[in-house]
Amino acid sequence: MKDKLSIVLPAYNESKMICKTRAKLAEVLEKAGIEYELIFVDDGSKDDTWAAIRTASETYPGITGIHFSRNFGKEAAIFAGLSQALGNVVAVMDCDLQHPPETLVQMYRLWKQGYEVIDGVKADRGKEGVLYKVSAGTFYRIMSKATGVDMKNASDFKMMDKKVVDTLLKMPERNTFFRALASWTGYRATAVEFDVQERKEGESKWSLMSLIKYAFTNISLFTAFPLQFVTFSGMFVLLVGIILGIQTIAKYLSGTAVEGFTTVIVLILFIGSIIMISLGLIGYYLAKMYEEIKHRPKFIISETSGVTTVDSKI
Ligand code: UDP
Ligand code: MG
């Protein structure tokens, strides 16, 4: 069988980019002589992204469109695309051309050499503020520890052998973190550096709140560290309590016990806040488990265009 590269492109409100991205990919891949198919997954866009995808798949061969009934998030879009991929090698990239198509050719050569997971690593994180760099850095340090995979400058830009994709699709969980999962599978991996390009049209879909939520979700998916942290803080508070208790008893016995009001207030506030944080954390993990137990589908497809094999039951 001839090699074929499937490229999965999650798209949310990217109407202006679909046409450009398709043209650029076609140019680069045809020049390199790589046979390919494009899978655009419209993640419930509010603009005319779906119309643009449908037009592209009706005009050019080898273009598949998947349209979600609503916004299910980039992870869901990636997994829908992966389950549709027909090639024996599959790439995932943003469809705003921030991931340079030329890097695909480099990744493809590495795949030909026998690598099964080729990670795109950001050489230059593009135009990002200091605060963003620091918080992203902290998040990735925690994630690297939790996953045992070096997550520094990691991205969703990857190429994988079909067998890695099949392994990923067999994972039953609803909440996924694609960026870490591909390397987590343990297949023969390597990395390629790329420069993050500037976004030409549209805007980034990330807000500060969504980034915080994203970090928290992914840390909780890979590690129970926050829960251990709760236990340790509990022990610490207990220690402080014991010391203060001994001091109070000593004062009482020596007949100097008077104020103590401040201590009581401080202790109540301190212990109260620790208990609230702990309960919140436990509740968060419970909520995540509840989501998994419900076994709802990761995404719901309302329409497709081009040749499609997927259904919404995945
Ligand atoms: N995206 C998506 N669903 C979402 C948000 C984003 O499919 O809910 C897609 C988006 O269309 C783009 C990619 O994910 O192709 C990366 O998003 P974005 O460019 O907003 O992120 P950034 O590059 O700023 O990190
Ligand atoms: Mg982008």
Image (cartoon, grey):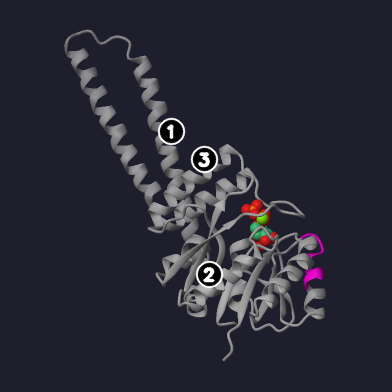
Q: Which residue is mark 1?
A: 273
Q: CA distance from mark 2 to mark 3?
A: 36 Å
Label whose residue precedes the other's in the sequence (1 or 2): 1
Chief secondary structure of the magenta portion = helix
Q: Which mark is residue 134?
A: 3
Q: Secondary structure at mark 1?
A: helix
- 109 or 261: nearer the eye? 109
Image mark count: 3
The verdict on label 2 being within 8 Å of ligand 1 is no
Picture coordinates of residue 126 (x, y %)?
62, 48
Q: Which mark is residue 295?
A: 2
Mark 2 crowd level (few <14, some 14–19, many ≥20, 10 Å Cα): few
Q: Which residues are magenta?
A: 46-53
> Image quarter for residue 296?
bottom right
Residue depicted at 55% across the width and 55% down the height? 122
Q: Secondary structure at mark 2?
A: loop
Q: In this rendering, which labeled residue sits more in front, label 2 or label 3?
A: 3
> Does 191 appear above or below 264?
below
In the picture, measured across the screen, residue 231 lies left or right of residue 183, that is left
